Amino acid sequence: MTFIRRQEEKLAIRVLQWRYQNRGLPLPSPPDLKSQAVQIVGDAHRIARERGQNVVSIIKDLVNDLKDK
């Protein structure tokens, strides 16, 4: 795993934690947060390849969409 990918996953974890806390929901366990972040980053990279968009903005959008459901 590359340095940038690890940083993107850390960013996704921080955004997920913020979204959970912002909505007053209990935080999932660290392994659950990590797996959610890995999935979000993977989806963001797939979307970026298809659409040519910025990965960081896609990560934020995916986290927002995930928590809105």
Image (cartoon, rainbow, N blue to C red):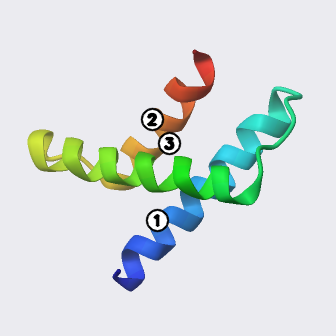
Q: Badge 1 local density, few (<14 within 10 Å), some, or many (20+)?
A: many
- Up the image or down, 37 lies above or below 20; here it is below
In the image, 46 versus 61, the foreground residue is 46
Left or right: 23 in relation to 57:
right
Residue annotated with mark 2: 62
Residue drawn at (45%, 56%), measured in percent from left and top? 38
Q: Callout 3, which amino acid? A: Lys
* Quadrant in which the N terminus is drawn: bottom left
Q: Secondary structure at mark 3?
A: helix
- Up the image or down, 69 lies above or below 6; here it is above
Q: Secondary structure at mark 2?
A: helix
* Quadrant in which the C terminus is drawn: top right
Left or right: 65 in relation to 52:
right
Q: Earlier in the sequence, mark 2 or mark 1?
A: 1
Q: Earlier in the sequence, mark 3 or mark 1?
A: 1
* Marker disc for residue 60: 3
Q: Callout 1, which amino acid? A: Glu
Q: Position of residue 50 (x, y in %)?
A: 10, 41
Q: Quadrant of residue 67?
A: top right
Q: Quadrant of residue 62?
A: top left
In the image, 1 versus 32, the foreground residue is 32
Q: Badge 2 local density, few (<14 within 10 Å), some, or many (20+)?
A: some
- Nearer mark to the viewer, of 2 and 3: 2
Tag 2 near tag 3, CB within 8 Å: yes
Q: Position of residue 40 (x, y in %)?
A: 43, 46
* Marker disc for residue 8: 1
Q: Position of residue 54 (x, y in %)?
A: 29, 51
State the CA–CA distance, disc 2 to disc 3: 5 Å
